[in-house]
Amino acid sequence: MAVFVALADFTQKGIENFSTTADRAGLFKEMAQKAGVTIRDIYWTMGSHDAVIIMEGPDDEAVTAVMLKLGSLGNVRTETLRAFTSSEMKEIISKVPG
């Protein structure tokens, strides 16, 4: 399973409904699971972004579909990043042309 990190920022709608953010996160986890994406964890953060989502998915398409659905709900805007483990990075480096 591929690992992804998503940076999330509240929209105006999302900040107006901040008191239900943890409940919405639970619903998001359930929705993602049905689509084959596992949400490892969600952290609410201080600083440039309001939350960080760590997830695993079978492929880019499955994660993209889940994040499109999340964005369509109107509470957050996201930036999703593909993450690589040390062993995955070693494999990628081994493929760099000489």
Image (cartoon, grey):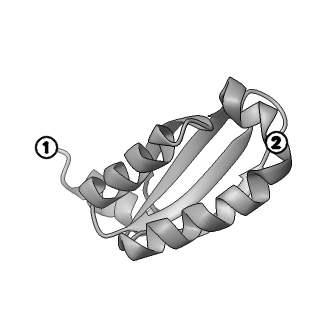
Asked if the residue at tag 2 contacts the one at tag 1, i.e. Cβ–Cβ closer than 8 Å, the answer is no
Q: Which residue corresponds to the image point at 70% horizontal and 36% vertical from the top-left?
A: 14
Look at the numbered disc 2 and give the secondary structure of its residue: helix
Residue at image position (68%, 30%) is 13
First in sequence, mark 1 or 2: give its number: 2
> Which of 52 and 35 lies nearest the eye of the viewer?
35
Give coordinates of residue 84: x percent, y percent. Answer: 43, 57
Query: What residue would you read off at disc 2?
Result: 18
Tag in front: 1 or 2: 2
Residue type of the residue flagged with mark 2: Phe
- Residue on which disc 1 sits: 97
Residue at 56%, 35% in the rendered image: 74
Left or right: 6 with respect to 59? right
Q: In this view, does 93 lie above or below 11?
A: below
Q: Is mark 1 on a helix, strand or loop?
A: loop
> Left or right of 45: which side holds 41?
left
Q: Residues within 10 Å of mark 2 (few under 14, many from 20)?
A: some
